[in-house]
Each structure stands twice: as structure tokens, then as C-alpha cells.
Image (cartoon, rainbow, N blue to C red):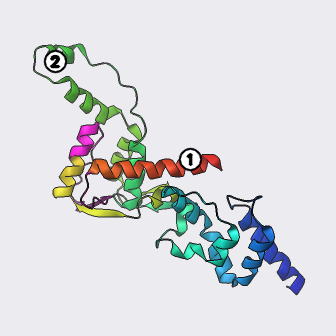
């Protein structure tokens, strides 16, 4: 490859990177390209590869990227990302009950409950005669029919636990601070109670799974950390909608 061809290849790679920058058109092409040229080939590759993960991570944490691409390149901002985020621009295979799998599960649980059929005449009679509680019956019905996509994950976990499932890299990002919770332990029962309170389907009994990942509590409650989780999820979806 001649020197001229090398320069053209560097320029093409830069433009491919630069067109993904959120401030493209308002930024300075010349300054950004100068910083791009100052990087080594390996650094340029990392800057481009990690850009989707960087933008998703900023959105997840409620930050809007308003600085120039030249700043991203000069300060090598991608190097400050948590480890393991290289796949955030595409998709990853999530191990059953692992971090990304559980993040996908909570993302699906965040969707509205499916419309429920009315209670049966027998159930209404049981309620009228004081032998059943209406709210408890509705929660049970919601857990069975309200989130079919989550129930499908439960079925996959029992049928083909080693298969895992493909989830978006952005969803995997949400799980970076999840912690392992022992099945049957104190935090486990807290999470189970939160699922029951919301009418969500609980995790299946496998008989072999010892640990499952959940958002880190750090002294808070499941409701507290789920509020933060869904805020971050909304931030990611708003960024995707704006692209």
C-alpha cells in the first residue's frame, strides 16, 4: 500500500467513526481528524470499536454527550469504561441466570402487563364468600399471563439452561454492577417478595442453580434499585430513538 493509499485508508476509517459521533455536523472535522492521526492504529481501532459502548454507557448514566469528538480522542475517553463492555455495540450471548440474562429479564418485566381476562364466576364466588382474596388472585393471574416473554425465559432456563440467549449489548451494559445472590438466601427472599408484590413471575425452581444475579442492593431495597435500573433503561431507549 502506497503512502497516499495509507492516508486515504486512515481518512476513511476516521469518517466511519466520525459519522457515529452524536454532535456530527456541529463538531470540528479538522480538530477531530488531527487527534485521530495522533493515535496509533491500535488506539484508533479501540476508539471506533468502543464508541457504541461509550455512548450507551453515558446514556445509561443519564449523561448527554456534548463535548467534541476531538476531546473523546485526545483524552481517550473509551479507556475509562468498565471492563467487559466491548460487545455493547452489538449483541452478546447471555448465560442463563447470569448478569446479562437477568438484565434482559428485568427489561422485559418493565413492559406493561398484558391485558388480563376477567376472573371466573367461580373465583368471584370464592371472593364473595370470603374464601379468596381478589388482589391475590389478580397477582397470581398476572404472574402466569401478564409477561409471556418472561415466562418464555423461564421455560428456556428449565428446558435448555446451557443454551443461554442473545441480548443487546446495551442491555448487557445495565448489568455491569449486578451481584450474585445465593438461591434461598436473605437477598433472594427480598427479591422474591418484590416480584410477588408486583405480580411478576418468579424464577423457576431448577434444583441445581445456586447463584443468580440481581441489581446490587448496597443497603437499599429491591424497589429502590429497580427504580434506578428502569431510569437507566429509559435513558438507553431514548438514545436509541434519537439515532
In the rendered image, residue 214 lying in the magenta stretch gets the answer yes
Q: In which quarter of the image is residue 15?
A: bottom right
Q: Quadrant of residue 48?
A: bottom right
Instruction: Please name the residue shown 54% across and 48% down the image.
Output: 237
Counting labels gives 2
Vertically, is 72 above or below 94? below
Viewer-side residue, 54 vs 220: 220
> Which label is found at residue 50?
none
Instruction: Please name the residue shown 10% across and 21% down the image.
Output: 131
Q: Quadrant of the N terminus?
A: bottom right
> Which label is found at residue 127?
2
Residue under numbered circle 1:
238
- Residue 3 appears at what percent x and percent y? 87, 86
Instruction: Please name the predominant secondary structure of the magenta segment in the image.
Output: loop
User: Which secondary structure, mark 1?
Assistant: helix
- Residue 167 appears at what percent x and percent y? 48, 55
Query: For mark 1, does the 10 Å Cα neighbourhood hold few (<14), some (14 to 19), or many (20 or more) residues?
Result: few
Left or right: 132 as drawn, with respect to 167? left
Left or right: 180 as drawn, with respect to 27? left
Left or right: 25 as drawn, with respect to 216? right
Q: Give the range drawn in magenta.
A: 193-221
Mark before the other along the chain sequence, 1 or 2: 2
Amino acid at each position: 500500500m502506497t503512502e497516499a493509499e495509507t492516508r486515504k485508508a486512515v481518512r476513511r476509517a476516521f469518517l466511519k467513526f466520525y459519522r457515529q459521533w452524536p454532535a456530527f455536523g456541529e463538531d470540528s472535522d479538522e480538530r477531530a481528524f488531527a487527534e485521530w492521526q495522533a493515535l496509533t492504529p491500535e488506539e484508533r481501532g479501540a476508539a471506533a470499536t468502543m464508541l457504541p459502548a461509550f455512548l450507551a454507557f453515558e446514556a445509561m448514566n443519564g449523561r448527554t454527550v456534548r463535548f467534541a469528538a476531538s476531546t473523546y480522542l485526545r483524552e481517550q475517553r473509551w479507556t475509562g469504561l468498565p471492563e467487559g463492555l466491548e460487545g455493547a455495540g452489538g449483541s452478546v450471548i447471555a448465560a442463563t441466570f447470569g448478569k446479562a440474562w437477568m438484565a434482559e429479564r428485568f427489561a422485559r418485566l418493565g413492559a406493561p402487563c398484558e391485558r388480563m381476562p376477567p376472573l371466573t364466576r367461580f373465583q368471584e364466588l370464592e371472593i364473595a364468600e370470603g374464601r379468596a382474596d381478589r388482589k391475590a388472585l389478580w397477582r397470581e393471574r398476572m404472574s402466569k399471563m401478564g409477561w409471556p416473554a418472561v415466562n418464555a425465559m423461564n421455560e428456556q432456563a428449565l428446558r435448555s439452561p446451557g443454551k443461554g440467549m442473545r441480548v443487546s449489548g446495551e442491555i448487557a451494559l445495565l448489568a455491569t454492577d449486578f451481584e450474585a445472590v445465593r438461591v434461598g438466601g436473605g437477598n433472594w427472599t427480598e427479591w422474591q417478595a418484590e416480584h410477588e408484590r408486583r405480580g411478576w413471575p418468579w424464577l423457576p425452581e431448577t434444583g441445581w442453580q445456586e447463584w443468580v444475579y440481581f441489581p446490587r442492593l448496597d443497603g437499599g431495597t429491591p424497589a429502590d434499585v429497580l427504580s434506578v435500573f428502569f431510569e437507566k433503561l429509559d435513558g438507553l431507549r431514548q438514545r436509541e430513538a434519537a439515532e
